[in-house]
């Protein structure tokens, strides 16, 4: 706006200068004409010069006036565009604030060996979108030497405690704590997040999320033939509602550890507390729901 103000002042000064010069020439010509002190030839030349100057001045002034109108219209257009952008952002904020989803994990969490079908899908097709890898693990080496790695699945029941129906849940990080040890899992490169499977249990009438984890066998993260105790699970996850409103949050799970191993090598953890903290405000997601 300051730049446009400077342009306006410059135009006014130019128009004032042209008008002043034109007035001086016009008065001078008619002064000599009135006193009859010049020759007719000189007077004709002066009149033609004055007419030419007035024509040029008229052209310049009309051009500057057109530029002034153009700059004014351009300024109004920018103001209108800015107002439209602000209105669109406000509409998106209102829409996002009323159509997000927040979940609470509940009941029993299960950890069990991953199905061979999903392992083969990753090894053969290289589909790592539904797997998370222990920090430092090279997913390419996992695909080449799968026998050196342990594949487990984590199944967590959840319910929507606020907002709309959930269409997808993805993970940025999954962290298991056992005493002083922390096992941190991340998506494989170049992915920024890992997708989870969302299943509906018709018996319990609850929805479950399933995420697959990969760790080296020499790391004492999980032993399918033993009871595996953990003190806490921390998740960084993204929840997308059915209306494509996305919420980023952190979820802490506290639970009681299993007392025995079930027949299918499953460890069952009874969830006692689920704390969800909002990391980012709800926003409309441009990513397709999976």
Image: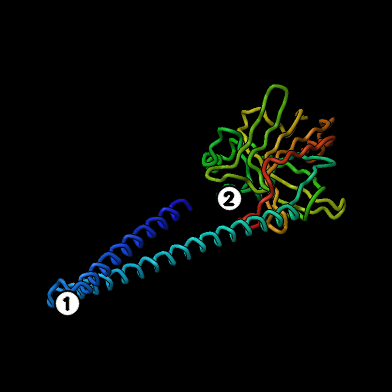
Name the foreground residue: 146 vs 269. 269
Instruction: Answer whether labels 2 and 1 touch (C-beta < 8 Å).
Output: no
> Which structural element holds mark 2?
loop
* Residue 223 appears left or right of 158: left
* Residue 1 appears left or right of 231: left
Q: In this view, does 252 lie above or below 47?
A: above
Q: Which of marks 2 and 1 is in front?
A: 1
> Which structural element holds mark 1?
helix
Name the foreground residue: 150 vs 57. 57
Quick one: which residue is furthest to the front in this view? 35
The residue that label 1 is drawn on is 44
Q: How many marks?
A: 2
Quadrant into which the C terminus falls: bottom right
> Which picture quadrant has residue 211?
top right
Q: Where is residue 21 in the image (x, y as percent from the top left)?
A: 28, 63
The tag on residue 80 is none
* Residue 81 appears left or right of 171: left
Quick one: which residue is furthest to the top in this view? 180
> Which picture quadrant has residue 271?
top right
Q: Which of marks 2 and 1 is nearer the N terminus?
A: 1
Q: Is residue 279 above or below residue 160?
A: above
The residue that label 2 is drawn on is 127
Distance between mark 2 and mark 1 Cα atoms: 92 Å
Name the foreground residue: 184 vs 89. 89
Within-10-Å neighbours for mark 1: few <14, some 14–19, many 20+: few
**Residue at x 57%, y 47% (from the top left corner):** 123
Q: Position of residue 256 (x, y in %)?
A: 83, 31
């Amino acid at each position: 706006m300051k730049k446009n103000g400077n342009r306006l002042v410059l135009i006014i000064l130019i128009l004032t200068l042209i008008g002043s010069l034109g007035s001086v020439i016009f008065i001078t010509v008619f002064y000599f004409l009135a006193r009859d002190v010049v020759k007719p030839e000189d007077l004709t030349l002066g009149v033609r010069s004055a007419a030419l100057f007035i024509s040029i001045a008229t052209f310049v002034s009309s051009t500057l006036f057109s530029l002034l109108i153009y700059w004014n219209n351009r300024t109004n257009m920018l103001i209108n565009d800015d107002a439209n952008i602000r209105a669109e952002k406000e509409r998106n904020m209102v829409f996002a604030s009323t159509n997000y989803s927040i979940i609470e994990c509940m009941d029993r969490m299960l950890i069990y060996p991953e199905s061979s079908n999903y392992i083969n899908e990753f090894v053969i097709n290289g589909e790592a979108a539904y797997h998370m890898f222990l920090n430092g693990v090279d997913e390419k080496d996992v695909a080449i030497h799968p026998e050196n790695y342990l594949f487990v699945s984590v199944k967590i029941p959840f319910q929507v405690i606020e907002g709309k129906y959930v269409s997808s849940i993805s993970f940025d990080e999954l962290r298991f704590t056992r005493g002083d040890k922390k096992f941190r899992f991340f998506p494989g490169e170049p992915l920024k997040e890992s997708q989870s499977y969302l299943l509906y249990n018709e018996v319990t009438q609850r929805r479950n999320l399933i995420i697959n984890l990969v760790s080296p066998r020499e790391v004492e993260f999980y032993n399918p033939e033993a009871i595996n105790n953990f003190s806490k699970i921390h998740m960084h996850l993204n929840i997308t509602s059915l209306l494509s409103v996305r919420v980023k949050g952190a979820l802490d799970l506290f639970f009681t550890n299993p007392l025995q191993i079930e027949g299918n090598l499953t460890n069952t953890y009874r969830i006692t507390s689920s704390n969800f903290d909002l990391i980012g405000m709800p926003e409309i997601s441009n990513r397709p729901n999976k």
